[in-house]
Image (tube, helix red, strand yellow):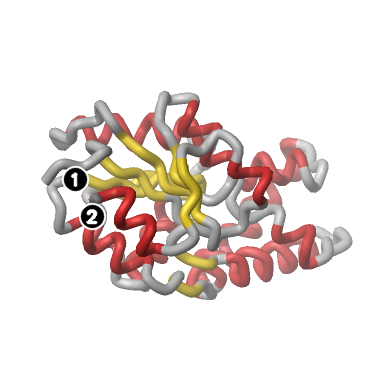
Amino acid sequence: MTTPYSCILFDLDGTIVDSAPGITATLAYMFEQLGKPIPSPSELLRYVGPPLLDSFRDLAGFTPEESARALAIYREKYLNVGAYDATQYPGVGVVLKAVHESPLLMSLATSKPETPATLILEHFNLARYFDVITGASDDEVRSAKKDVVAEALIRLAAMGADISRPVLIGDREHDVHGAAANGVPTIFVEWGYGSVAEQAGSVAVVKTPEELTTLLLG
């Protein structure tokens, strides 16, 4: 099999699963527990995808101390309830299975911490398709997309993968920028949370999982 790419990196939120309901509900709970006004649904949706600590700083204006408290509240609720309030995008499982059955090795590359990311993939019976699951560290010290992508490539290389022609599949501008920081192109999926403006810099934009399979495997 001749393919345009030598290994595959997949984002999670907005790419494999619609996890917004669980994330936004947990965020609303967190703001309530902190005694702060709960942002509107559209404002809460802006938190989905980027690293949470970045969003706490940039969107909520939290201090580092407030962010640490917010993260603790969020994490406990999300791990127990919110992580499972998600829906797998139709057809994406077929793409993952096809890549798994090809010679290409594949890693998750998400800004979500690895523990909830793994729980979600296992919940939807998708973890079996990944050679390695890479995400933010559970303490979120590693959470920037560029750092997650770099770690995914290190882990794939350690497994013997050819990382000379990697590609990332994602749905937000931080996917595109984080991949580009590692010299990795991004295929942008339209079914996620990103706007048209966020597609800038991607090497391709796909409307359906079927289109994605064709681009990845020919």
Q: Which residue does the numbered mark 1 point to in the structure image? A: 104
Q: Residue at x 50, y 49 (%)?
A: 205
| Residue 118 percent coordinates (x, y) | 36, 59
Task: Residue 202: tell me if it is visible.
Answer: yes
215 horizontally vs 201: left or right: left
Q: Residue at x 61, y 66 (%)?
A: 20
Element marked by disc 2: helix
Task: Residue 137: tell me if it is visible.
Answer: no
> Dot 2: within a 10 Å radius of its alpha carbon, few (fewer than 14), some, or many (20 or more) residues?
many
| Residue 175 percent coordinates (x, y) | 52, 41
Please name the amino acid that badge 2 sits on.
Answer: Val
Asked whether disc 1 touches disc 2, contact meaning CB atoms under 8 Å apart, the reply is yes
149 horizontally vs 49: left or right: left
Q: Is residue 141 above or below residue 206?
A: above
In space, the residues marked 1 and 2 are separated at their CA atoms by 6 Å
Please name the amino acid that badge 1 sits on.
Answer: Leu
| Residue 138 percent coordinates (x, y) | 46, 46
The answer to which of 185 and 118 lies nearer the viewer is 185
Q: Which residue lies furthest to the right in this view?
A: 37
Q: Which of marks 1 and 2 is nearer the N terminus?
A: 2
Q: Which residue does the numbered mark 2 point to in the structure image? A: 99
Q: Which residue is drawn at 28% across and 31% down?
A: 165
Q: Which residue is drawn at 76% across and 44% down?
A: 66
| Residue 133 percent coordinates (x, y) | 32, 49
Q: Is residue 51 above or below residue 149?
A: below
Rendered image quadrant of residue 199: top right
